[in-house]
Amino acid sequence: GQNIDQPTEMTATEGAIVQINCTYQTSGFNGLFWYQQHAGEAPTFLSYNVLDGLEEKGRFSSFLSRSKGYSYLLLKELQMKDSASYLCAVHQAGTALIFGKGTTLSVSS
Amino acid sequence: EPEVTQTPSHQVTQMGQEVILRCVPISNHLYFYWYRQILGQKVEFLVSFYNNEISEKSEIFDDQFSVERPDGSNFTLKIRSTKLEDSAMYFCASSEGAGYSTEAFFGQGTRLTVV
């Protein structure tokens, strides 16, 4: 079976730091992706992890622990435009991405 | 910057009708995908396509669905006899490689409404 869990909603204020967690149970694992999706738009790629540890890319960082089936996306210096859904997605095997339900982040001033 | 383009952006169709959703993947990409997202729900994998054949498909992708690459640029999803529950946003995506470490680029989607 496969299960990817994320919080449904989170709120934060401009300039703050927020961490969005993702836990997964999948029958295979070939990497974990984070995508950003603004309402009514396409998902856009943020990060990819396949080895344990932290990947940093500007204001965004992503962490993976394969033994714990756990990842997080860290957003620093939040801006209003960061209000969006953040999708955790796992490559089990083959070519398909299996998505979680997404976390809707609301950033207020 | 290269992008995946989808047409139409919106499609309204009557139940039982056939629809074709069109996509132009990024030109040097080799893997093509269709995903769908029912309003308020998660993005779901439908099918992947490589070397002119389906490489993987989900349980959702039943006999009423088909994909085709009719020429060197287009990639289409056909739904033969639409049902109300087919109403969703359909995203086309493409990637350079098999996806293990390569990101999939998504198009802006086609919003399909079945009435």
Image (cartoon, rainbow, N blue to C red):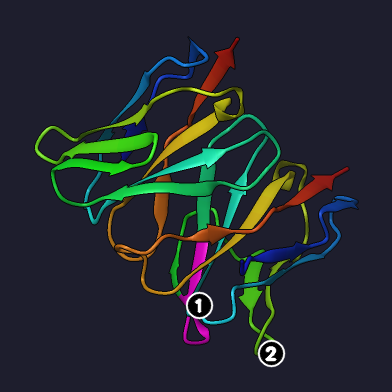
**The numbered mark 1 sits on a residue in which chain?**
B
Q: Residues within 10 Å of mark 2 (few under 14, many from 20)?
A: few
Q: Which residue was labeled with disc 1?
A: B29
Where residue B53 appears, as percent x and y from the top left, is: 50, 82
Q: Secondary structure at mark 2?
A: loop
**Label total for image:** 2
Where residue A5 appears, as percent x and y from the top left, is: 35, 28
**Residue found at x 47% / y 19%:** A8
Q: Nearer the viewer, residue A40 or B35?
A: A40
What segment is highlighted magenta in the picture? B47-54
Which of pointers 2 and 1 lies earlier in the amino acid sequence?
1
**Residue found at x 56% / y 16%:** A107
Q: Using the image, tell me which numbered label, if any, was put on residue B86.
A: none
Let me know if residue B92 is in the magenta part.
no
Q: Residues within 10 Å of mark 1 (few under 14, many from 20)?
A: some
Q: Compared to B45, does B33 lie above or below?
A: below
Q: Which residue was labeled with disc 2?
A: B71
Give the residue type at disc 2.
Asp
Q: Is residue A10 left or right of residue A58?
A: right
**Residue found at x 63% / y 55%:** B91
- Contact between labelled residues 1 and 2, with CB atoms less than 8 Å apart: no
Give the residue type at disc 1.
His
Q: Compared to B69, does A106 lie above or below?
A: above
**Residue found at x 43% / y 23%:** A77
Nearest to viewer (mark 2 / mark 1): 1
Where residue B69 appears, as percent x and y from the top left, is: 64, 83
Q: Is residue B7 left or right of residue A47?
A: right
Outermost bottom residue: B71
- Specify the quadrant of the image occupied by residue B113: top right
